[in-house]
Each structure stands twice: as C-alpha cells, then as structure tokens.
Amino acid sequence: MFNAAAHDAGKAAEGPAPLLSVVMPIYNEQEALPLTVERLRPILDGLGIDYEVVGVDDGSTDATPAIMQKVRQDWPQFRIVRFARNSGHQAALTAGIHRAFGDYVVSIDADLQDPPEKIPEMLSLAREGNLDVVYGVRGDRGTDTAFKRRTAGAYYWLMRKLVGKKMPNQAGDFRLLSRAAVNALKAMPEHQPVYRLLVPWLGFPSGEVVYVREERVAGSTHYPLSKMVRLALDSITNFSAAPLRLATWLGMLSFVLCVALGIYTAVEYVRGETVPGWSSLFVGMLFLGAVQLICIGLLGEYVGRIYSAAQARPAYFVGYDSAEETDEGTRKVSAYAM
C-alpha cells in the first residue's frame, strides 16, 4: 500500500508544493539520460515556476544510478526515487505519479521519443482551459518500423473498442494530469494499472497536444515484442471481461459444430460409410481440444489476477527517495510502496 506518512513527511520537508512535477521512469538509460537532462532542464527553467523532476530508477543495473546522483548534485529540482528491484515501466510510472508533489504532473520517458518541448504547451492548455488531463498524441510515427506501426494501430483500435472513443488514438504515457486526476488515480484499487485505459475511463475534462514521435536518442528499446504483448494482455484482462465472453461464444460454437458432426455421423452410419468419416471425427476432436485450451487459458489469466490481488503484495518497493532525507543527508523514513 502507499505510505502516506512517508510521502507527507517528504512533502513537508520540501516545503510548499511545486506547480509542476515531471515524472520520468528510468531503466538502464546511462546513454540517454544525460542527453535528456540537457534538453529538459532549460525548458523547465524557462517556465519561471516552481517544479520538480521525479526520476524513478526501476532497478537499473548499469551506470544510471550514479548518473542520477550526479544530476541531482547539479540540479536541485531533480529528485530520485529508486526501486529495490526492477518492477516494470507501469510500476515506475505509478510510483512517480503517487509520490509527485506538483499541482500538475507530467509523465515522460527518458529516451526523448516524446519531446519535452511540448510540456509548456500542455501546462498552458490545462491552465487556460481548466483541463484535468492533456494527452500527448502521436501525429506521426514515421520513425517506428512498419511492424511497430501496425501492431500499435491494432492495439489502439482494440482498446478503443473496450474503453470507447473517449480514449485518444495514438496516446501513450506522455500526458499531463491535474492534482484532482492524480488523487482519483491514487484512490483506484488497481493492482496492475494500465494508465492508457484508466485515465480516459475517469472521464475528466481533457485536451490533446499533437507531436511527431522521434527516434530514441540513445540505447535500445526497453519495450520489445514480448512486453508489447504483455501490455496488450494486461490492458484487456485488467479492464474488460470480454475474453471470458469470448470463451463462452467459443464454447457455444463448438457445441453447434458438435451437433452438426453428430448429425453427419448418424447419416454416414445409416449409409454404412462410417469408416471414411474418421477424418471429420479427428478434425472435430482437434477443434474441441483447441477451444478447451483457449478457455482454460483465459480463465487462468483471470484466476491469476484474482490470486495476485488476494495476496495484496505491493507492485514495487521503494528503497530510496531523495525527498525523504534530512538536512544531514540521512534517511528520514523507510520508504514503502503500494
């Protein structure tokens, strides 16, 4: 669960809440992080407002933690939240959003595929239009491979079918949230939140900022095909019971086919040609076996999530938060995660 006492203690130590928090999940970005900081800091300094940057280290195993410590020494607004182990991008995003102090919270990745130059536009749009959510919408994905564009298009098409048209097309995790939206997300009992679906589902007043998706500034992607499939599966099973209904329809279809095969078998028996019918029987058995395995697999996915929720095991553990240090630099509290 979220440690409100630790969070409030850190907030009190930091003084008044900043207007803007920028949450940045980071995992093994030793090459990209210095370039991201070099590009992000002048933009935020130029806003003329109080802000913080919450860098969430998702258990990096390269030189990223040391680089983050050096950045903090040179950049007082840079705050470090470090996981005890790697817990995944969505968990890092959750930790950053839940621990951010700002009246507005922007989430952005550390690879510069989402341009930080759009942050002032997001903030201006939210304040002028009294909006609680501003989505960063990818207007051009020309830097992605054809396979990535097609699979992403299929994902957003399917998600819009589940959530409705209120989910913006081609909107990832680059977005701005007001404090009201953040508090609503913190109150959600989701064990494995997928913010691309949860945020539109809240129904808060929203706007969009369109941008061109750039190439990764350095390093390699941390979202290979396996993680993309995992995200799609989590999105579907966490947000909809449609797969269970699919299993029901498959069962009904198999029943109809079994009846048809039974009639066909009876006709062949009357005609005395039952031996040649072995192929249809064989195909029918294969079909029924496949349907049963699909249904069992779908049920297993949901049972697994029920089991995980019943355990109430935290999605991540925060081993360190620089906002929870005393003036002497020692730990004030033992950070505990949700």
Image (cartoon, rainbow, N blue to C red):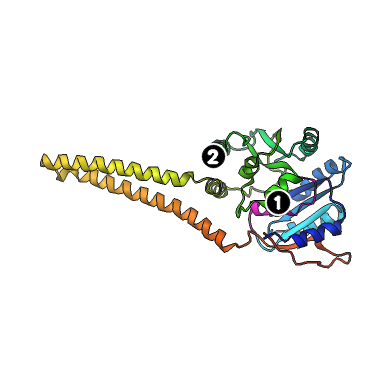
What kind of residue is marked 1? Pro
Residue 182 pos. (x, y %): 72, 47
Residue range in magenta is: 87-106
User: In the picture, residue 327 is in which quadrant?
Assistant: bottom right
Position of residue 307 relative to residue 136, above or below, is below
The residue indicated by pointer 1 is 25
Marks 2 and 1, how far apart in space? 27 Å
Position of residue 132 relative to residue 87, above or below, is above
The quadrant in which the N terminus is found is bottom right
Report the side of 285 relative to 95 (left or right): left
- Front-lying residue, 203 or 153: 203
- Front-lying residue, 35 or 287: 287
- Which is more N-terminal, label 1 or label 2? 1
SS for dot 1: strand
Q: Is residue 108 visible?
A: no
Residue 99 pos. (x, y %): 75, 54
